[in-house]
């Protein structure tokens, strides 16, 4: 958005600011939280462009000449994974209408396993990756929210150089979600199906074409590089994009009272029986942690053979019994209940208290991956369905 | 940008036995400039590595007014610490840090200082005791109440001998299980309370096993201490030491960057386990 007046929109509180003249095109109910959909713009906005779907493959193939391009590729079993494009032929498997990636794209900045340094005969050689220009093309809004959350986490206090180098030179292209999975509840967490800021480009599906919203100078420069593939957006197309967003938001049918859940957690208004029941059912497989876009816990370990080896880090998780066990055998979170509670308290209480943003982006992967049907949305439904002590 | 995960080579200059499987290592960085520039304060810890074995957080037991080395007192509890305890002077070890916050020092001048430790828990307090004793005239009473399960579990026996001779330093020892001709008191550290009288308030620094710390905090509060004047240093499983790996989380805090020193007012004792 360029210069102009500031407009705040929202029911009970402002949820977005627009630095340009706007008219409110559509309003969608977002449960009790109050929510106003992104508005369409009166004036011709230079920031909105059109990309014809038939030009997508050319854009991606040409982008891949000078950058690594990560994109959602469908495998033979129908799973969609976010992978780097190796050869143009793979574009045949491009699927931008996927409901959800099984593994969120957090692994691009924070791989499941990575070496921190190698050592040989007592000499240490850091294995810090070299930053490279790369595009994350076809992200969902919730997943970008997750990435932005993880960005902040790895940047604060002692900045993590490995994460920094893996994410420097990143361009994010969101393709707003029009086909949510049944476990998605992003309209309750205000993290989708479209994103309001923090993106470089965002695509809105208008049928044969995408409306392209530009969210940063980085995004603007990218379009400039492939100017001939982009058209100007008409007023009608901009208007149409607003309608698409409203329809998309309505397609997210699972709604939870997220705000109330956060209130009850931050005010310690959670009956312990809820955690006890979860602790009883949980099989402590850790699936929910691995597929969570904002879980960043890791373990460090050495691997050595004949004086040569490396120190690695790999994903770890707070539900595991060994996660907090000390060398003495003492374990401050030994009991299942406090381990079960930790995950919910971390996402819905401590993250919120420390950063003002909850670590839950409403993707529903924890529920999808859970063999015993535990997930944050179920937890919230159960909690907010009970009487509050207040 | 600094790569915080890279440890730096250091040499074990000397090893002193403290008790069963417990040694104090005097360590000097290989790089002279690095050693000179290594600044720390009592309460902080370093991450100690043996390449191929692993890494663990260890409190610095020496005081920063002694320049040119650091001392770490290590009890062989796990794979790494047992491997470290097999090392000898001249061996190489890898260090990064220092990390964590510090015991309040400047703000407590003029007050009575109570140090209450259990077993290996004296190590982090020793850094502070040494610094306080180096500037003895700036403080009130200096009292150490120190207990261990067995007499051999009491560390820093040589220092204790010296401290007992110092004017204005009071040392009370206790062992839970008397062995090897122990003639001192038998019991737990809170049973030393009467010996340490008069309790006129002051500042307390505690380190020991979780149950011991909990009992001591409760006893101090009953004795009339303000929670704000009670400082604990907590132990947790830690991997990174820089607030990233998540292992040492307590509530929304990380022991490695928000601690390891917490005041009893800040550390919700009931929630230590969460």
Image (cartoon, coloured by chain):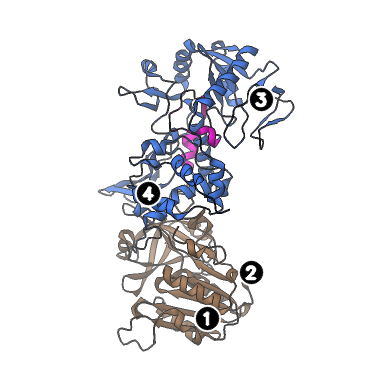
Chain colours: A blue, B brown
Residue, disc 4: A300
Which residue position is annotated with label 3? Answer: A1
Looking at the image, do the residues carrying marks 4 and 2 touch, with CB atoms under 8 Å apart? Answer: no
Please tell me if label 3 and label 1 are on a single chain: no
Secondary structure at badge 1 equals: strand
Q: Does the magenta stretch include residue A258?
A: no
Q: Do labels 3 and 4 share a chain?
A: yes
Determine the CA span between mark 3 and mark 1. 65 Å
Say if residue A153 shows up in the picture.
yes
Name the residue that disc number 2 marks: B107
Q: What element carries label 3?
A: loop
Q: Does residue A140 lie above or below B10 as drawn? A: above
Q: How far apart are marks 4 and 1 (CA)?
A: 40 Å
> Do tag 3 and tag 4 residues touch (Cβ < 8 Å)?
no
Q: Mark 3 lies on which chain?
A: A
Whether A174 is among the magenta residues is yes
Looking at the image, residue A332 lies above or below residue A157: below
Q: Distance between the residues labelled 3 and 4?
A: 43 Å
- Distance from disc 4 to disc 2, alpha carbons, whole Å, reads 37 Å
Q: Which chain does the numbered disc 4 sit on?
A: A
Q: Which of marks 3 and 4 is in front?
A: 3
Residue B66: image x %, image y %? 51, 69
Q: For mark 1, does the 10 Å Cα neighbourhood hold few (<14), some (14 to 19), or many (20 or more) residues? A: many
Query: Nearer the observer, disc 3 or disc 1?
Result: 3
For label 1, the residue is: B143
User: Residue A92, position in %: x, y?
Assistant: 37, 15
Segment colored magenta: A161-189
Residue B239 seen in this snapshot:
no
């Amino acid at each position: 958005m360029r210069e102009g007046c500031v407009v705040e929109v929202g029911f009970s509180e402002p949820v977005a600011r627009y630095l340009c003249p706007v008219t409110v095109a559509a309003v969608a109910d977002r449960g009790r939280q109050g929510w106003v959909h992104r508005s369409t713009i009166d004036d011709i906005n230079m920031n909105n462009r059109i990309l014809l779907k038939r030009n997508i493959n050319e854009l991606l193939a040409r982008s891949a000449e000078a950058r690594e391009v990560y994109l959602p590729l469908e495998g033979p079993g129908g799973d969609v994974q976010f992978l780097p494009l190796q050869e143009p032929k793979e574009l045949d498997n491009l699927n931008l209408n996927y409901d959800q990636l099984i593994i969120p794209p957090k692994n691009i900045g924070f791989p499941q396993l990575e070496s921190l340094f190698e050592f040989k005969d007592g000499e240490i050689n850091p294995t810090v990756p070299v930053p490279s220009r790369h595009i994350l093309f076809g992200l969902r809004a919730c997943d970008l929210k997750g990435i932005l959350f993880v960005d902040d986490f790895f940047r604060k206090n002692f900045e993590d150089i490995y994460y920094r180098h893996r994410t420097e030179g990143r361009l994010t292209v969101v393709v707003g979600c029009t086909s949510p999975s049944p476990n998605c509840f992003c309209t309750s967490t205000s993290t989708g199906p479209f994103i309001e800021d923090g993106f470089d480009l965002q695509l809105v599906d208008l049928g044969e074409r995408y409306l392209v919203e530009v969210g940063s100078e980085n995004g603007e420069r990218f379009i400039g590089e492939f100017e001939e593939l982009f058209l100007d957006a008409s007023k009608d197309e901009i208007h149409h994009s607003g309608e698409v967003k409203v329809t998309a938001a309505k397609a997210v049918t699972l709604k939870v009272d997220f705000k109330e859940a956060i209130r009850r957690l931050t005010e310690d208004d959670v009956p312990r029986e809820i955690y006890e029941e979860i602790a009883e059912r949980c099989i402590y497989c850790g699936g929910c942690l691995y597929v969570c876009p904002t879980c960043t816990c890791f373990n460090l370990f050495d691997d050595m053979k004949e004086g040569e080896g490396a120190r690695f880090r790999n994903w770890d998780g707070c539900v595991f019994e060994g996660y907090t066990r000390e060398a003495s055998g003492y374990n401050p979170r030994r009991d299942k209940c406090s381990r079960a509670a930790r995950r919910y308290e971390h996402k819905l209480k401590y993250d919120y208290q420390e950063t003002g943003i909850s670590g839950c982006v409403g993707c529903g992967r924890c529920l999808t991956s859970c063999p015993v049907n535990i997930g944050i949305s179920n937890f919230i439904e159960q909690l907010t369905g009970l009487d509050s002590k207040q | 940008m600094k790569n915080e995960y890279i440890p730096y080579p250091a040499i074990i200059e000397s090893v002193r036995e403290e008790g069963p499987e417990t040694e104090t290592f005097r360590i000097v960085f290989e790089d002279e400039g690095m050693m000179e520039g290594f600044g720390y304060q009592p309460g902080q810890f370093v991450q100690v590595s043996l390449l191929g074995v692993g890494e663990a957080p260890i409190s610095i037991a020496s005081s920063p007014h002694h320049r040119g080395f650091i001392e770490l007192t290590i009890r062989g509890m796990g794979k790494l610490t047992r491997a470290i305890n097999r090392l000898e002077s001249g061996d190489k070890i890898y260090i990064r840090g220092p990390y964590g916050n510090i015991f309040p020092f400047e703000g407590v001048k003029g007050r009575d200082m109570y140090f209450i430790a259990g077993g290996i828990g004296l190590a982090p307090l020793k850094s502070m005791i040494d610094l306080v004793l180096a500037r003895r005239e700036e403080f009130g009473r200096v009292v150490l109440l120190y207990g261990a399960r067995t007499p051999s579990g009491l560390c820093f026996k040589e220092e204790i001998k010296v401290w007992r001779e110092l004017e204005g330093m009071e040392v009370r020892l206790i062992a839970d299980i008397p062995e090897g001709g122990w003639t001192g008191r038998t019991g737990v550290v809170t049973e030393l309370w009467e010996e340490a009288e008069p309790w006129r308030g002051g500042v307390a620094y505690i380190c020991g096993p979780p149950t011991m710390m909990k009992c001591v905090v409760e006893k101090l509060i009953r004795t009339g201490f303000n929670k704000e004047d009670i400082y604990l240093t907590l132990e947790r499983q830690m991997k990174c030491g820089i607030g990233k790996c998540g292992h040492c989380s307590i509530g929304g805090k990380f022991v490695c960057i928000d601690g390891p020193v917490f005041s009893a007012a800040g550390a919700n004792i009931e929630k230590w386990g969460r």
